[in-house]
Image (tube, grey):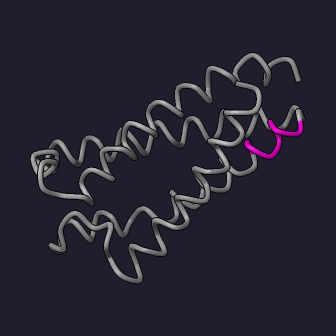
Amino acid sequence: MRRILPILLILTALVTVIYWVIYFTGGAVRVVNAPWYTAFESSFPVADAWLAITAYAAGIGMWRGDGWGARFGLLAGSALLYLAALDITFNIENGLYARLPGSGPMWFEAVINVWSLGLGVATIAASWKRAANS
């Protein structure tokens, strides 16, 4: 886990940036093009930028074994959990998971939701004790 978690955090930061480039340049990751959906999704880039910065910093710091990496891990883990909770709630309230059988973008959203929850919990669990001891 000592090397896997930093790699996953750095990968998360990179995929987050790529997601937004695709979202704003071609829209292939959009589940629907309705104004209510794009208004919601378009409010995420600043929060996701924070997530990407903290995940990248945590990944680098953890890879190097620096104490600040665990502190950034707590920031990244909490950002992952918060954004996952917000996104999952939106998807449930708007019936978007019902689109899973025929929608590649919705499958990608579901993977993002599961990834964010799992990595958020794993990052906080791995960072908690290290951050307190550094």
Residue drawn where x is 25% and y is 41% of the image: 89
Q: Out of 109 and 84, give the one closest to the viewer.
A: 109
Does the magenta portion include 63?
A: yes
Residue 83: percent from the left, percent from the top?
Answer: 43, 45
Residue drawn where x is 75% and y is 49% of the image: 57
Q: Quadrant of residue 106?
A: bottom left
Does the magenta portion include 23?
A: no
Q: Is residue 107 above or below residue 16?
A: above
The residue positioned farthest toward the bottom in the image shown: 25
Residue drawn where x is 36% and y is 42% of the image: 113
Q: Quadrant of the C terminus?
A: top right
Residue 82: percent from the left, percent from the top?
Answer: 45, 40
Q: Quadrant of the N terminus?
A: top right
Q: Is residue 56 above or below residue 61?
A: below
Q: Is residue 134 left or right of residue 125?
A: right
Q: Is residue 68 left or right of residue 12?
A: right
- Number of numbered markers: 0
Residue drawn where x is 27% and y is 70% of the image: 39
Q: Out of 105 and 43, give the one closest to the viewer.
A: 105
Q: Is residue 95 above or below residue 2?
A: below
Instruction: Provide the residue span drawn in magenta.
Output: 58-64
Residue 112: percent from the left, percent from the top?
Answer: 40, 47
Residue 36: percent from the left, percent from the top?
Answer: 18, 68
Q: What secondary structure predominates along the stretch shown in magenta?
A: helix
Q: Quadrant of residue 126?
A: top right
